[in-house]
Amino acid sequence: MPSESPPSRAHIDAVELTRDLIRRPSVTPADAGAMAIVEETLRNLGFACRRMKFGEIENLYARWGEQGPNLCFAGHTDVVPVGDAGAWSKDAFAAEVVDGVLIGRGSVDMKSAIAAFTAAAAEAIEAGQVRGSISFLITGDEEGVATDGTVKVVEALAAEGEHIDHCVVGEPTSAETFGDMVKVGRRGSINADIVVEGVQGHVAYPHRAANPVPVLVRLLSALQSRKLDDGYPEFQPSNLEVTMIEAPNTATNVIPGVARARLNIRFNPNHTGRQLADWFDIEAWRAQGDFKGKITVTSSISGEAFLTERGHFTDLVAAAVADVTGAPPELSTSGGTSDARFIRALCPVIEVGLVGKTMHQVDERAPVDEIRRLQQVYARIIARYFES
């Protein structure tokens, strides 16, 4: 009998590649060798790979092909901390498969997506389906402060004239069942740190002090009393959430000298980050009144709201998901922020990934079957993209 032919160099097992990546404990901002695995795998497939390091963050841009259109996949190798390691049923970085489920930090968010798209791209290239280019934009700074990752790579690529036509981001977008939702946009996000500095004193002699607590409460009440909006086409209403209040004080008979608060607004296109920051300042000025102390508001805009308008690209992705699941996904803008907020400066972007229920949790886990189905979805996206 003739011997079996060796497996193709282009064949990649998405589950095994995911396990290899999980075994690299790349807790943000550490890399731990995860980026090298992605780079070596893509280089072996014929991709031209460029490490783009900013600060201490490892980033990678890899491209197969020189002609357009250029379909890009974006993702991140960094993961959030394990938390209580003793609460895990398995070592968070052992990447064990138990009863068909892969357990490990990054299994959902989002090393599996990187592996699945890599496997799909390898098969598409070998099959001659790619009439153009496929690229990867991988960062190690998505779960961290996100200052030296995708945003810097996007700026550098734009300055160089690198053209990306469309992008798929591998965030875990499915809500309840695999493929039930993809993200076509995201709300913006703004944080505000509020510090009210007063004058410490004895509670029995308030005229000798300036209590910052009532001033802070007055400011927060004014901010929370405003109804930001009723929503926006394709978006849910904006919401303001107070995330921290403190007035460091261990005594019962002392008026504190300072009070602090922190808040976040997730906003739709009815607003811009700058408009909301200006509103904070106006309300702080009103709350100041005749207060003898000082109010300082420091705003930080994490990202603006954006939407990839429905059209050929969104239809193509939705059809690819339906090819595998049998039902079209919901096109949603819900959830938190992602690096798509930076990539949209280059091209239309859509996010497609696994069910996100266990991301950032103890025993983060992904069914092996769903990782393989995600590979099938990505394969259909690639095939449909270069057919059109």
Image: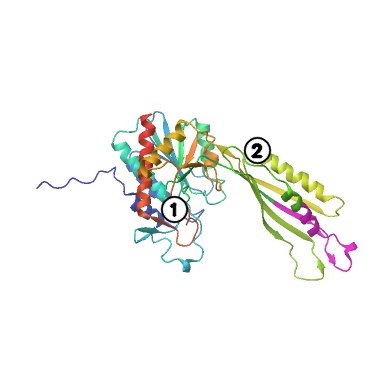
Residue 326 placed where, x, y %? 37, 43
Residue nearest the observer in this picture, 89 or 94: 89
Q: Is residue 51 left or right of residue 222?
A: left
Give the amino acid at mark 2: Asn
Give the amino acid at mark 1: Val
Colour basis: rainbow
Q: Please tell me whether mark 2 sits on a helix, a strand or a loop.
A: loop
Camera-near label (1 vs 2) is 2
Q: Quadrant of residue 363?
A: bottom left
Residue nearest the observer in this picture, 21 or 289: 289
Bounds of the magenta segment: 193-219
Q: Is residue 264 magenta?
A: no
Indicate the quadrant containing the C terminus: top left, top right, bottom left or bottom right: top left
Q: Please tell me whether mark 1 sits on a helix, a strand or a loop.
A: loop
Residue at (74% x, 49% y) in the render: 225
Residue 76 placed where, x, y %? 47, 48
Q: What is the CA distance from the residue labelled 1 to the residue labelled 2? A: 32 Å
Q: Residues within 10 Å of mark 2 (few under 14, many from 20)?
A: some
Residue 308 placed where, x, y %? 52, 35
Residue 356's place in the image compared with 48, above or below, is: below
Residue with the mark numbered 1: 108
Residue 365 showing in the rendered view: yes
Residue 47 showing in the rendered view: no
Q: Quadrant of residue 305?
A: top right
Q: Quadrant of residue 137?
A: top left
Q: Residues within 10 Å of mark 1 (few under 14, many from 20)?
A: many
- The label shown at residue 270 is 2
